[in-house]
Image (cartoon, rainbow, N blue to C red):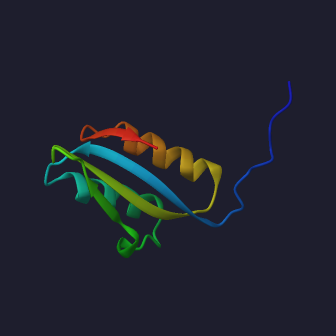
Amino acid sequence: MSTRTDSLITYPSLFPIKVMGEKVEALLPAVTQVARMLDPTFDERTIELRESKGGRYLGITITVTATSREQLDELYRTLSTHPLVKVVL
C-alpha cells in the first residue's frame, strides 16, 4: 500500500474555508477563535459573511494561511465538531 505524498495545494497558501451555522451571536467569535488558534497570522479582514434568505443561518468564509495538510485537517476537525457549526466546506 502506498502513501500519497503529493498535494494539490502548495504550502504556504491562502485557503478559504466556508462555515455555516445558525445565526447566533456566538458563531462568528467561535469561528474566529478557531482560525486564530490554528493560524496565528489569521487576518479578520478576510472574513466574509452571508446570511440565509430567511435570516436563520449565517455563512462565514474565512481565509487562512495553510501551512500543512495536518493544519487544514485540524481546522476542519475543530470547526466541524463545534456545537454551533452545522457545515464546513
Horizontally, residue 55 falls left or right of residue 5, namely left
- The x and y percentages for residue 54 are 16, 44
Q: Choose top left, top right, bottom left or bottom right for residue 42.
A: bottom left
Please name the residue shown 41% across and 61% down the image. Answer: 62
For this orientation, the residue located farthest to the top is 1
In the image, residue 39 lies at what x, y percent?
A: 47, 64
Quadrant the N terminus occupies = top right
Q: Position of residue 6 (x, y in %)?
A: 80, 47
Compared with residue 33, is residue 56 higher up or lower down, i.e. above or below? above
Task: Check the image and report above or below for 48 versus 85.
Answer: below
Q: At x 15% / y 48%, what residue is drawn?
A: 55
Please identify the quarter of the rendering in which residue 3 is found: top right
- Residue at image position (30%, 60%) is 49
Residue 36 drawn above or below residue 70: below
Q: Is residue 89 left or right of residue 52?
A: right
Number of callouts in the render? 0
Who's the residue at 25% across and 37% down the image? 83
Residue lying at the far front of the rendered structure: 53
Looking at the image, is 14 positioned above or below residue 84? below
- In the orientation shown, which residue stands out farthest toward the right? 2
